Image (spheres, rainbow, N blue to C red):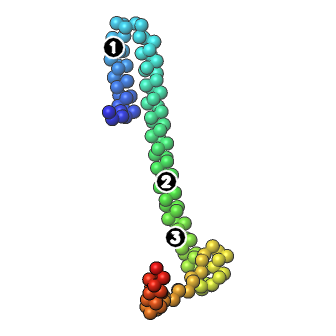
C-alpha cells in the first residue's frame, strides 16, 4: 500500500472538519474533538509553510555553495598555474603551496626485457 502524502492527509482532515462543522449539533459529544482537530490542522498547515520556506532556503544555499565551489576551483587552478609558471612545473618549491611537482616519466621497459621476464616467470612456474 503506497504511503499517503502529508498534503493528502491534510486535505482529508480538512474535509472531515468542514463536514462535521455543518452538522456539529447532531454530534455534541464530538465538539471538543472537532475544535482540537481544526486547531491541529491549522498548526499542520503552518508547519508545512515553514517547511517549504526552509526547503527553498536549503536549495538556495546548496546552489550558492556549488557556485562558490566552482569559483574556488577556478581560482585555485589559476593560482596553481601562476605558481608553476613562476617556479617551473618540476620545482620542489611547489610543495610549500600544497602542489605536487611534475615528476619525470618512468621509462618503459624494452619489449625484449619484458619477454625475458615473462619467459623467466613461466620457467619458474
Does 125 appear above or below 1?
below
Q: Are marks 3 and 2 in contact (CB under 8 Å)?
A: no
Disc 3 residue crowd, few under 14, some 14–19, many 20+, Cα 10 Å: few
Residue beneath disc 1: 22
Residue 85 visible to an observer of this rendering: no
Q: Is residue 89 above or below residue 71?
A: below
Which quarter of the picture shows residue 38? top left
Q: Quadrant of the N terminus?
A: top left
Residue contact between numbered discs 1 and 2, judged by CB atoms under 8 Å: no
Tell me the crowding category of disc 1: few under 14, some 14 to 19, or many 20 or more residues within 10 angstroms, Cα based.
few
Q: Nearer the viewer, mark 1 or mark 2?
A: 2
Considering only order in the chain, which callout, 2 or 1, is on the residue closer to the N terminus? 1
The tag on residue 96 is none
How many residues crowd around disc 2 within 10 Å: few (fewer than 14), some, or many (20 or more)?
Answer: few
User: Is 54 placed above or below 101 here?
Assistant: above
Residue tagged 3: 74
Residue 15 appears in the figure: yes
On screen, residue 47 above or below 28: below
Residue at image position (59%, 81%) is 101
**Disc 2 target residue:** 62
* Residue drawn at (34%, 25%) of the image: 12
**Could you tell which of marks 3 and 1 lies nearer the N-terminus?**
1
The mark lying in front, picked from 3 and 1, is: 3
Frontmost residue, 124 versus 17: 124
SS for dot 1: helix
From the top left corner, tell me how far across and down residue 123 is, in percent: 45, 84
Give the distance between the C-alpha atoms of the residues marked 3 and 2, in whole angstroms.
18 Å
State the image quarter where residue 13 is shown.
top left
Task: Give me the C-alpha separation between circle 1 and circle 2.
Answer: 47 Å
Which percent across, then down, holds residue 37?
43, 20
The residue at 45%/36% (across/down) is 49
Q: Position of residue 114 (x, y in %)?
A: 45, 88
Amino acid at each position: 500500500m503506497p504511503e499517503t502524502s502529508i498534503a493528502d492527509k491534510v486535505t482529508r482532515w480538512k474535509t472531515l472538519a468542514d463536514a462535521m462543522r455543518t452538522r456539529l449539533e447532531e454530534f455534541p459529544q464530538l465538539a471538543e474533538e472537532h475544535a482540537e482537530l481544526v486547531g491541529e490542522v491549522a498548526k499542520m498547515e503552518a508547519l508545512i509553510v515553514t517547511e517549504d520556506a526552509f526547503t527553498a532556503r536549503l536549495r538556495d544555499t546548496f546552489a550558492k555553495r556549488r557556485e562558490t565551489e566552482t569559483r574556488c576551483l577556478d581560482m585555485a587552478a589559476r593560482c596553481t598555474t601562476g605558481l608553476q609558471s613562476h617556479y617551473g612545473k618540476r620545482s620542489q618549491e611547489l610543495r610549500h603551496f600544497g602542489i605536487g611537482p611534475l615528476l619525470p616519466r618512468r621509462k618503459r621497459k624494452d619489449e625484449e626485457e619484458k619477454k625475458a621476464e615473462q619467459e623467466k616467470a613461466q620457467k619458474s612456474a
